[in-house]
Image (cartoon, helix red, strand yellow):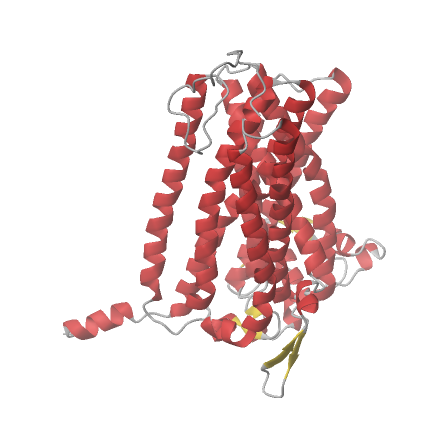
Amino acid sequence: MIPLDALGTTVLAVDPVPWARSQMAFTLAFHIILVPLGVSWSVMTLTANYRGIKHGDADALRLAQRWSKYMAVTFAVGAVTGTVLSFEFGLLWPKFMGQWGAAFGVPFAFEGLFFFTEAIFISIYIFGWRRLRPWAHFWTGVPIAVAGVFGAISVVAANAWMNSPQGVTLDSAGKVVDVDPMGVIFNDAMPLMSAHMVIAAYLVGGFMVASVYAVGMLRGRRDRYHRIAFLIAFTVASIATPVQMGVGDALARWVFDNQPTKFAAIEMVTETSSDVPEVLLGHLDSDGEVVGGLPIPGLASWLSDPSTGKNTVVQGLDETPAADRPTIHEVNVVHLAWDVMVGLGTLLFLFTLWYWASWIFRRDMPRSRWFLRGAAASGFLAVVTLEAGWTVSEVGRQPWIVYEKMKVVDAATANTGIWITFVGVVVLYAGLGVTTILVLRMMSRRYRENGRLEETGVPYGPSEPPSEPPGEPTDERKVPV
């Protein structure tokens, strides 16, 4: 029999690398849902705010005021989950931070500045309702949108550096001895990766917010307030979607030119060749052979470089040593995630064409319940597309944590009890997610029950209708700024 103490040691002493990867993946997958709201919701709020002031539209002003408070809640939750991610770099990847922290930390220093700017102006903007003049209050919201975009760019710059490590000088032992901050931030991968993420934030954020109001409209709430909310959010997403397809295509070509092994995993190309088919779905079996799927002859080669078409040579996985390329399982994950991202992205693009065609030919949004059903589902589909895109980016880089400089297994913690923190984080995030949804639903219900402009400056209000200041009219259409 195995002694109890030895059994306990065996249970606790597990390989820390898979658990470290799982915890990082889980927390990032959770946090990234909040990022689009943090970047795009301020722009949508300011759009409603501008309309309200410019046209004396009380419904738009009411919408802007409520959105600002929803935005504060999601920003607070995002701050918590983002802070956890920051600590995880040291907890889960101490060897990576010890080797590359001087370079990797540069973009995060700038992100911290933008984060605090965003937090300060969110507070001023919410507090400013009924306390500042209309246009002065509007302009206090602009730094929120600007800081949100540059904060996202800063974080993506750090991730881009992991894909294209530049701006560092190494000694003979491979240690960092000099860092060029601008070289780190503006690495070769940064422009396209940052653009891809920022546009994705507007796409996903717009669809997420629009889907909530589409559900309300399906339930009979087709008043002017719901219509304005839906139109603002869905229009933002509809503008971002076709732009994203162009940026995504350019980024895929950058990967083809600079990370051929990742591209081979994306396209599931096992041997270097030309006239490579685009295989929809399918997978690699245990022998590394392509099984199933729908091959479209020559399309992968043509998409890689249209100037040479089917004659474009695509490097296969066989060109990379087995120790330096993704495993068969990782290739299957990357390829499936790619198909999901491209497939759902194309579906959302076609859906926005329906929306724009209706405006062009009928001067109105589609009235069909099928359109509203699709709009209600678009938020979820957009989130799945976003998660799939990050899976392609991160799993496709395997086995490297810093491309061709350091492998994941060499960067992870040696703490064999790391699985305990993973379990704790899952439980904590589950509670945080449920609480966030309940708070947002509670706020929405109270706002519907009150049905008027709110004066309270706290994100949980109002619990009861506010009273008008002495000597002021009680007209509900009075501008609340």
Height in image: 20 above or below 64?
A: below
Instruction: Work out whether residue 388 or residue 417 is closer to the camera in this orientation and state it.
Output: 417
Instruction: Work out whether residue 291 or residue 230 is closer to the camera in this orientation and state it.
Output: 230
Residue 242 picture quarter = top right
Height in image: 465 above or below 457?
A: above
Residue that appears at 44% across and 33% down:
458
* Image position of 442 (left or right of 99): left
User: Furthest-front residue in view?
Assistant: 471
User: Furthest-bottom residue in view?
Assistant: 172
Rendering coords of residue 110 (x, y %): 60, 59
Height in image: 143 above or below 416?
A: above
User: Furthest-right residue in view?
Assistant: 307
Point out the image quarter for the C terminus: top right
* Image position of 465 (left or right of 12): right
Can residue 315 be seen by looking at this rendering?
no
Height in image: 141 above or below 154?
A: above
Rendering coords of residue 143 (x, y %): 63, 43
Residue that appears at 51% across and 70% down:
408
Rendering coords of residue 17 (x, y %): 42, 68
Can residue 220 be seen by looking at this rendering?
yes
Rendering coords of residue 31 (x, y %): 48, 49
Residue that appears at 56% across and 20% down:
226
Total residue callouts: 0
* Image position of 255 (left or right of 425): right
Point out the image quarter for the N terminus: bottom left
